[in-house]
Amino acid sequence: MNLRKKLTFLGVFTGAALGTMHIINRLFYYLSTADNLLDQNNYEYYNWRFGKIAYIKKGKGSPILLIHNLDVCSSSYEWNNIINKLSETNTVYAIDLLGCGCSEKPMLTYTNFLYVQLITDFIKNIIKEKTDIIASGESNAFALMACANDDSVIKRVIMINPENLVTLSKNPGKHSNMIKYLLLSPVIGTFIYNMKVNKRTIREQLKEKYYYDHNKIREEDILTYFESSHRDKIHSKYLYACQKSRFTNANVTCCLNKLTNSIFIIIGNNNPENLLIANQYQNHLPSIEILGIDMAKQVPHMEKPEEFIEQVNVLLSSDE
């Protein structure tokens, strides 16, 4: 086979491969959004400078801001099991972070400080008074940094299973931009994203990491997470690429011991690592109080909502 034939074959093969990936990408988008489980009409919107932010507001009373885990699959849906109960005594705001849920998913570099600014601006412009925060997973770091950045906007912070401080301290490496550009490529990057984030991988993550009782995982949860990760022409891959490249990491150890806010941590007791991580935070700020919920892992607010609400009521009432 001469060089011209080899190049022709390579070109045809590459074109066919890209065409197949494109079809698969389109199929993923159709399947993930067909049910419209995250109805945009159910939200109010904050026209933030980097994109529209979807949020839910319920109840009356002292404000509480709920911030879901920073994950392309996550959204304010994470709080569905507790938001109505909390709204009986408080004004509750459940936000979809930029790049997640029904919020806009702009094609930009997502960084830790971007989310710190979003939290601060949302409190100042929408809530308009000092608020309590309940945050989940990696988003806890943004809440703590927002406290350190402006102590006039946040009263108390309840963290749910915060991220390992060692993991959060890892900065983008020399290969970070290469990983980011590969994932952001139009066809191949989207195909890689779809292989990494789909119904099967979401189901596995919920079983292996998030839930202790697998019987509490509903098909609706999986489908909603799947839809959240693929809305807006799968533009969540921009956030995914930045997370994989460590641009959203936030080293909070330097600000922990300077905080004057009341900080609490609620963990799922059935993942032993959760207590070890909570102790990391307490070692830097001894005033942090740690509470555990049995028969739960990473999402006690979804898996054991009644017990979670009891803990929250105790924490917020005892510190008034």
Image (cartoon, grey):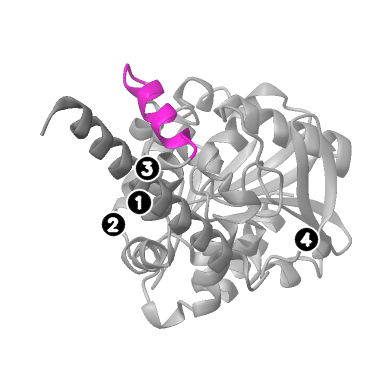
Judge depth for marks 4 and 1 and give the one in front: 4
Q: Secondary structure at mark 3?
A: helix
- Quarter of the view holding residue 53: top right
Give the mark nearest the N terminus, 1 or 3. 3
Range covered by the magenta-colored residues = 173-186
Q: Are marks 2 and 1 in contact (CB under 8 Å)?
A: yes
Task: Identify residue type, mark 3.
Answer: Gly
Q: Is residue 177 magenta?
A: yes
Which corner quadrant of the image does residue 122 belong to? top right
For residue 272, the mark is 2
Q: Is residue 308 left or right of residue 192?
A: right
Write the residue at 24% across / 30% down. Answer: 7
The residue pinned by badge 4 equals: 40
Q: Earlier in the sequence, mark 2 or mark 4?
A: 4
Q: Secondary structure at mark 2?
A: helix
- 180, above or below 60, in the image: above
User: Is any part of residue 295 visible from this angle?
Assistant: yes
| Image position of 286 with respect to 190: above or below | above
How far is the residue under mark 2 from the one under mark 3?
Answer: 49 Å
- Residue most extreme to the bottom: 215
